[in-house]
Image (cartoon, rainbow, N blue to C red):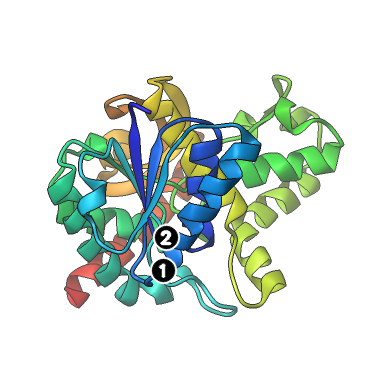
């Protein structure tokens, strides 16, 4: 493969992302984790599966960072997961230290890489990675909106009993309770869901989307979501590796767009070979804009908290 992606963290999200990258034949994969034997074992397992899945991507496991040299993309999943009753905000102190440390390691070895941050609390960890790597803002992107939009799409599909392929949805804002699903921009075969569903059903789907991660944490008891988060990160990576220029909702560093400054927040982004190549500004109603600004304020609080921790 002429492309190389490093995945930091060989837990459920990282290992699943490595599997999907390899099986799509997008790149060679380096899976890094501090636990001795775990990334090597999972990489070997994926290598053996390649004969059955019929792909020639190379998957390497490592505990150090030298094998990551020259990566085109680095997906950062490292950190402790949420436990039942734990908010994403509770994670900030521990995960800030982890994300800052690994970012410095990979940035030194892959100075031209694009970073996709998955670790929670997502928006805050984007700031940690951004400060640690010194890369231009286009090359640090957070995975949140793709996942949240996928959850909204799944719930719309279930509600209307239609193919999920026909559903499209946009979720803006921070990755948490203040995210902003946009029913006006959410469609089934081009038809806005506002014309297909009663308002109370739309409100229920919006609420379920906001709590999509917590719902899974509650069901699993001892873990958090990983299949959909991994798929979301890989969709972003594919658009970058293939220069597809897909417009996807991602956490991007805003400097005046949507009236928000110096903050990572979820907005529609054109993803191509240079990373976040363009931020798409869509017209919002007053109510939608107020919700987005409220979400930005919540992210700003996390960013301010990082300063007190640092």
Give the residue displayed 18% in from the left and 69% down from the top.
Answer: 307
The answer for how far apart the CA atoms under marks 1 and 2 are is: 5 Å
* CB under 8 Å between discs 1 and 2: yes
Q: Quadrant of the C terminus?
A: bottom left
Label 2 secondary element? helix
Q: Nearer the viewer, residue 2 or 204?
A: 2
Instruction: Name the residue nearer the viewer: 295 or 268.
Output: 268
**Residue 129: percent from left, percent from top:** 24, 55
Q: Is residue 283 shown above or below 19?
A: above
Which quadrant of the view contains residue 256?
top left
Q: Residues within 10 Å of mark 1 (few under 14, many from 20)?
A: few
Q: Residue at x 38, y 68 (%)?
A: 79
Name the residue carrying label 2.
40
Res. 60 mark: none
Residue plotted at (38% across, 63% down): 78
Q: Is 204 positioned to the left or the right of 42 in the image?
A: right
Q: Which mark is residue 37?
A: 1
Q: Position of residue 178 (x, y in %)?
A: 50, 57
* Rendered view: 186 above or below 217: above
Residue 64 in view: yes
Who's the residue at 33% across and 26% down the image? Answer: 2
Residue located farthest toward the bottom when viewing the structure as drawn? 85
Query: Taking 285 as reference, is 79 above or below it?
Result: below
Q: Quadrant of residue 158?
A: top right
For the question of whether residue 171 can be seen, the reply is no
22 relative to 195 in the view: left or right? left
Q: Position of residue 283 (x, y in %)?
A: 46, 27
Left or right? Give the position of 304 relative to 118.
left
Q: Secondary structure at mark 1?
A: loop
Q: How far across and how far down the image is residue 216, in percent?
A: 66, 64
How would you rate the neighbour count of disc 2 (Cα within 10 Å): few for under 14, some for 14-19, many for 20 or more? many
What is the number of callouts on the image?
2
């Amino acid at each position: 493969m002429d492309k190389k992606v490093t995945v930091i963290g060989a837990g459920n999200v990282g290992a699943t992302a490595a599997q999907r990258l390899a099986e799509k034949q997008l790149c060679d994969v380096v899976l890094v984790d501090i636990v001795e034997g775990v990334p090597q074992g999972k990489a070997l397992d994926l290598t053996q599966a390649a004969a059955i899945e019929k792909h020639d991507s190379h998957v390497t496991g490592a505990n150090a960072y030298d094998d990551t040299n020259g990566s085109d993309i680095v997906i950062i999943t490292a950190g402790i997961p949420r436990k039942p009753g734990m908010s994403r905000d509770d994670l900030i102190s521990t995960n800030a230290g982890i994300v800052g440390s690994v970012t410095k390691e990979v940035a030194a070895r892959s100075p031209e890489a694009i970073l996709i941050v998955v670790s929670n609390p997502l928006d805050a960890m984007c700031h940690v990675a951004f400060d640690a790597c010194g890369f231009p803002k286009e090359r640090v992107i957070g995975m949140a909106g793709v996942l949240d939009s996928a959850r909204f799409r799944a719930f719309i599909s279930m509600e209307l009993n239609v193919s999920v392929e026909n559903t499209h949805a946009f979720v803006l804002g921070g990755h948490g309770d203040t995210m902003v699903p946009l029913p006006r921009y959410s469609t089934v075969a081009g038809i806005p869901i506002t014309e297909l569903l009663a308002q109370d059903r739309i409100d229920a789907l919006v609420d379920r989307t906001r709590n999509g991660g917590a719902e899974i944490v509650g069901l699993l008891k001892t873990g958090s979501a990983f299949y959909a988060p991994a798929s979301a990160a890989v969709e972003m990576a594919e658009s970058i590796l293939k220069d597809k220029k897909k417009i996807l909702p991602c956490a991007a560093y805003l400097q005046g767009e949507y009236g928000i400054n110096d903050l990572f927040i979820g907005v529609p982004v054109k993803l191509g070979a240079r990373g976040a190549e363009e931020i798409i500004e869509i017209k919002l109603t007053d109510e939608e804009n107020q919700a987005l600004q409220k979400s930005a304020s919540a992210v700003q609080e996390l960013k301010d908290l990082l300063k007190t921790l640092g």
